[in-house]
Image (tube, grey):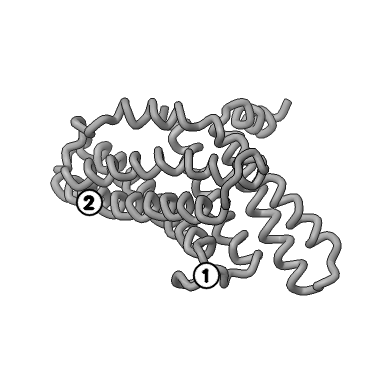
């Protein structure tokens, strides 16, 4: 079996990897479907791709019903970030964890309301969950920017020895990872604003293909980061 197929199977066997693949397919289908539907309003292929994207999105939402405990375990293990050397990074990470933890139950309530399992309006809960996601993204972007500043200072302090050369390379790799994190976060944040209630910045103004483009960009960055972390492990 080709190594590329084996790598794909390995990714799909993990929940994290499968989610990233589904996410990429979801946004990629929306991008292509949106472009085709824009060029030809009667394009059946474009409409089918948009429907396929919507079904994958529903799939991811349903799977996230089981993410609360894993998020709680991560938040508990991080705690107050005693291992973090920088105070700003620590507090932004704590606030991110709180926002992420609150996001899941809000989305679950919205999902249950849409499924008519509970009697409540889903739109306010979708708006709240999207707002929490956006807050987490903003904090993540700011944390990455702060981390880049810290890492660059460390690079400048490195000497000229062979050991220092290896350390500089490792630090620069971390910087590239944080830069990718910023780019991915900005792409997702643009979509998060789009999904907010009308009247908030550019909420509701993105055509499907642009939502797909932003989501595809952030998804590919996520796959690249996951691949880099697996290779470094």
Which quadrant does the C terminus fall into? top left
* Left or right, residue 222 beside residue 76: right
Q: Can residue 184 be seen here?
A: no
Q: Position of residue 160 (x, y in %)?
A: 16, 43
Asked whether the viewer can see residue 52, the reply is: yes
Nearer the observer, disc 1 or disc 2? 1
Label 2 Cα neighbours within 10 Å, binned few <14 / some 14-19 / many ≥20: some
139 sits to left or right of 71? left
Q: What is the total number of numbered labels drawn onto the structure image?
A: 2
- Quarter of the image with the N terminus is top right
- Residue 55 position, x and y percent, is 71, 46
Spatial CA span between label 1 and label 2:
40 Å
Q: Nearer the viewer, residue 224 or 157?
A: 224
Q: Residue at x 60, y 66 (%)?
A: 210
Which label was assigned to residue 152? 2
Up/down of 211 relative to 106, above or below:
below
Q: Secondary structure at mark 2?
A: helix
């Amino acid at each position: 079996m080709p190594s590329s197929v084996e790598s794909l199977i390995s990714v799909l066997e993990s929940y994290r990897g499968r989610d990233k693949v589904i996410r990429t397919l979801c946004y990629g289908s929306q991008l292509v479907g949106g472009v085709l539907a824009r060029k030809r309003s009667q394009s059946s292929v474009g409409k089918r791709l948009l429907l396929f994207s919507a079904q994958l999105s529903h799939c991811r939402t349903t799977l996230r019903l089981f993410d609360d405990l894993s998020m709680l375990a991560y938040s508990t293990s991080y705690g107050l970030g005693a291992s973090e050397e920088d105070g700003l990074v620590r507090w932004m990470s704590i606030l991110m964890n709180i926002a992420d933890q609150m996001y899941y139950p809000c989305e679950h309530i919205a999902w249950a309301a849409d499924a008519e399992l509970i009697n409540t309006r889903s739109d306010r809960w979708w708006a709240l969950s999207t707002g929490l996601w956006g807050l987490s993204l903003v904090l993540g972007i700011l944390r990455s920017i702060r981390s880049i500043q810290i890492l660059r200072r460390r690079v400048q302090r490195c000497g000229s020895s062979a050991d220092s050369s290896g350390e500089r390379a490792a630090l620069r790799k971390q910087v590239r990872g944080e830069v990718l994190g910023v780019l991915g976060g900005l792409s997702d944040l643009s979509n998060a604003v789009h999904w907010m209630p009308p009247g908030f910045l550019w909420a509701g103004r993105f055509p499907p293909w642009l939502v797909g483009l932003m989501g595809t960009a952030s998804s590919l960055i996520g796959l690249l980061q996951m691949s880099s972390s697996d290779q470094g492990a």
